Amino acid sequence: MPKLTAAELQTFLAGHFPHVDDVGFRVEQVAENFAQVRMIYHDDHLRPGGTISGPSLMMLADTAMYLAIMGMIGPVTMAVTTNLNINFLRKPKPADVIAHATLLKLGSRLVVGEVRMYSDGEAEPVAHATVTYSIPPLA
Amino acid sequence: MPKLTAAELQTFLAGHFPHVDDVGFRVEQVAENFAQVRMIYHDDHLRPGGTISGPSLMMLADTAMYLAIMGMIGPVTMAVTTNLNINFLRKPKPADVIAHATLLKLGSRLVVGEVRMYSDGEAEPVAHATVTYSIPPLA
Amino acid sequence: MPKLTAAELQTFLAGHFPHVDDVGFRVEQVAENFAQVRMIYHDDHLRPGGTISGPSLMMLADTAMYLAIMGMIGPVTMAVTTNLNINFLRKPKPADVIAHATLLKLGSRLVVGEVRMYSDGEAEPVAHATVTYSIPPLA
Amino acid sequence: MPKLTAAELQTFLAGHFPHVDDVGFRVEQVAENFAQVRMIYHDDHLRPGGTISGPSLMMLADTAMYLAIMGMIGPVTMAVTTNLNINFLRKPKPADVIAHATLLKLGSRLVVGEVRMYSDGEAEPVAHATVTYSIPPLA
C-alpha cells in the first residue's frame, strides 16, 4: 500500500523541488506501485512545430517515477536516477501530458519502472520511458 | 567536413530554440562528426543537494547531439529525437557542464551518437548518453 | 487485426531462423499489436547460479518483438533491430520464460514495443525490454 | 591497474561459462578500465542475409563488459547485468567481431561502461552498447 496520498506527494514536490513545481506538475493518482502525474501545458514546453519538447517529456518521466517511488517508500531517502531510457513515439499536441508511472521492481537498492505518457484526451502514448533509481543505504 | 561553424550553430540555436537559449548553451567546437557544447551554470539547474538536475543533463545531451548533426548536414531538415538513453555516473558539482557529442552513424534516415558530459575542470564524466535522431525524408 | 496466426508465425520462424528455432521458441498467442512467445527451458540457457542467462533473455525479447511485428504486417519485409534496451529485474528460475510483446507504435519506418518476460508460473517479471525495429522502404 | 591478465581472464571465462566459451570468445587485451574481446566467426551467429545476429552481438557486449570488470576487481564477486542498451549501427559482415569495452564508472555498487563493436578489419563500429552491472555487497 502507498505510504503517501496524492495530496501529500504534491506538498512534498513543492517543498523539495521548487523549480520543478514551477513547471506545473499535478499528482493526480497514487496506488500500489503506481503514480499518475499531469504536466500542465505551458509555452515553455514548446519546441518549433508547436509540439512539446523532448526535455519536458524527460523531466515528466523522471518526476513521475520519483513520485511513484516516494509514494511507496515515503519521503525518507535521497533516491537518485541512475538510468533513463526514453522512446519518443508520436508528436505531442500543445496540451497537458499525463504520465502513468508503474514500478516493475521495488528493490532495496534499485527501483525500476516504466512510464507511459499521453497527450490529454488521446489513447495512443506520445512517449515511453524506463527509469532506474538507486536507493542509498540507510545511514 | 562540417557544413556549419560553431558561431553559425550558435546563431541557429538562438533563432530556433529561444527557450533552450535562455538556458545558456555555448557551442564551443565543431568538427567531423563532433560538437562540444557548454551548459552555463545557473541556479535553475540545481536540485536538492546542490547538484545539477538530471533533466538539465538530458536537455544538454539532446541539444549537443542535435548540434553535432546540424553541423554535419546543415540546418535543412527537421530532425527529431527518437531515443535517448542516459546513465548518470557521478554527482555533478554546481558548475558548467561540458558535453562532447560524437556521431557513431550518420545515416540518411537515422543518426546515432554518444554524448559524454563533464563538470568543468573534471576528468571523469558525470553522465553518458546515447541518442538517436530520425531525419525526415526530403519533401 | 493480425495478418498471421500463431501457427503461421511458428512456421515462418522455423523456416527463416533455423538456429533460433533450435533454441526452442513457441508462439503461444497473437493478437492486435501483441505476441506471446515461450522460450522452452534448456541447459544451454543456464549461467552459473542456476539462472537463465542474460543473452538468452535478450534473444527472447528480440524474437518476441519480431514476431509481434510480423503478425501485424505479414512476413513481407526484412525488419532489423536498431535499438534494444533491457532491464534485468529478478533472477529467473531454471524454467520456461514467457514473453509478452506489445507494440507501442507501428509506424511505416520505425516500430517500437515493449516486452515483459516472466518465469513460468510467476506473477512478477524477470526482465523488461523496449525494442525498436526499422522497416526498410518498399522496393 | 588490472588485477588479471588477458590469459587469466581467458581461463576464468572457460571455467565459469562453458557455454559462452563454446561460442568462441578470445580475450585479446586488458588494461586500466578496458578489455578487448574477439568473437570468433561461426555459422551459428548468422541470420538471414549473411550478417551476424543481434543476440550474438548482445552476448559479446555483455561478456566483454563482464571481463573488463573482472579484470579490474578480480574474480571475487558475482556481478550481474542490470541494464543493457544497444544500438545496431551497420550490418556486420560474416567475420569476427571485436569488442572494445571501457568502464565509465567503477563504483562499489554499480559499474557502468560502454562497448564498441567492429567487424574485423573495419574502422566504423557495427554496434554500440552501454551496460550496467551490479556488484553484490561483500558477505
Image (cartoon, coloured by chain):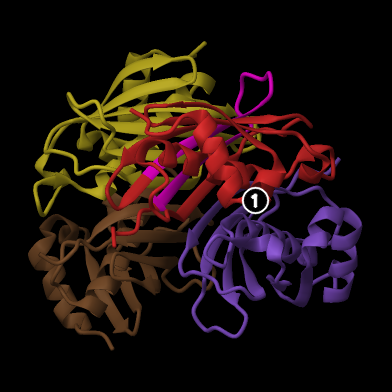
Chain colours: A purple, B red, C brown, D yellow
Q: Position of residue C35 (x, y in %)?
A: 32, 76
The numbered mark 1 sits on a residue in which chain?
A: B
Which quadrant holds the C terminus of chain A?
A: top right
Residue B49 position in % (x across, y down) = 84, 40
Residue A63 found in image quarter: bottom right
Task: Assign the N terminus of chain A to one quadrant of the image.
Answer: bottom right
Q: Amino acid at mark 1?
A: Pro
Q: Residue at x 44, y 53 (%)?
A: C85
x then y, percent, for residue B89: 62, 35
Q: Is residue B68 magenta?
A: no
Residue at the extreme bottom: C1
- The quadrant where residue B47 appears: top right
Q: Residue at x 61, y 57 (%)?
A: A58
In this rendering, the count of numbered labels is: 1
Tag 1, which secondary structure?
helix
Question: Which is nearer the eye, D16 or A126?
Answer: A126
Residue lying at 27% horizontally and 62% vertically, measured from the top left? C63
Name the spot of residue C73 as percent of width and height, x first: 22, 77
Q: Is residue D92 above or below residue B19?
A: above
Task: List the residue tagged with mark 1.
Answer: B18
Relative to A21, B120 lies left or right = left
Residue D5 is left or right of residue A64, and the answer is left
Res. C50 visible in picture:
no
* Residue occupying the point 24% across, 42% down: D90
Decide: few, some or many residues near mark 1? Use Cα within 10 Å; few <14, some 14-19, many ≥20.
few
Viewer-proximal residue, D27 or A28? A28
Residue situated in front as seen by the camera: C82 or B97: B97
Left or right: A51, with D130 as reference point: right
Work out whether residue D119 can be spotted: yes
Residues in magenta, as a range: B112-133
